[in-house]
Image (tube, rainbow, N blue to C red):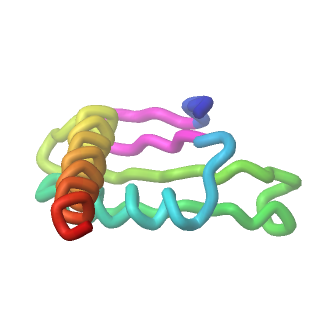
Amino acid sequence: MELRVTESTEDELSIEIAGEDHTFMNVLKGALLEHDDVSAATYDVNPEQSGGQTEPILTIKTESGADPLGCLEDAAVTVREKATSFRDAFEAAA
C-alpha cells in the first residue's frame, strides 16, 4: 500500500491510498466517522471528475484541535482490531 499526502492543514488531511478500492475505503471511512474528533471523512475514486486521478483520495476534517493524521492512525488501529476480532470469531466457529 502506498500513501501520498496531497493536502495537509491543522484540521484537514487529504491522502492518496494507492491500490485500494471501495471495500477498504468504506471500512476506513466508517472507522474515522466513529472518532469523536472527526467532523467529516470521505473519499473520491472518480477519475472523470478528478482530472484523471485513478487512486482513491481520503479526506479527513477534524475539530477541537485534533490532528487529522492522529485520527487516521486511531482509525487504522480500530480497523485492525475489528478484523482480528472477526477472524478470531470465524476461526472459533469453524
Q: Is residue 8 above or below residue 46?
A: above
Q: Main secondary structure of the magenta part?
A: strand
Residue displayed at 12% across by 58% down:
36
Residue 31 screen position, x and y as percent: 28, 59
Q: Is residue 86 above or below residue 1?
A: below
Image quarter hosting the C terminus: bottom left
Q: Is residue 67 above or below residue 27?
A: above
Residue displayed at 44% across by 41% down:
13
Q: Is residue 9 left or right of residue 46?
A: left
Name the foreground residue: 65 vs 54.
54
Q: Is residue 45 left or right of residue 13?
A: right
Can residue 87 be seen at all in this image of the molecule?
A: yes
Name the foreground residue: 36 vs 84.
84
Residue 57 screen position, x and y as percent: 60, 50
Name the foreground residue: 11 vs 57.
57
The span shown in magenta is: 7-16
Residue displayed at 62% across by 50% down:
20
- Mark count: 0
Image quarter hosting the N terminus: top right
Farthest front residue in view: 94
Can residue 38 be seen at all in this image of the molecule?
A: no
Q: Is residue 58 left or right of residue 82?
A: right
Is 11 one of the magenta-colored residues?
yes
Residue 56 screen position, x and y as percent: 64, 53
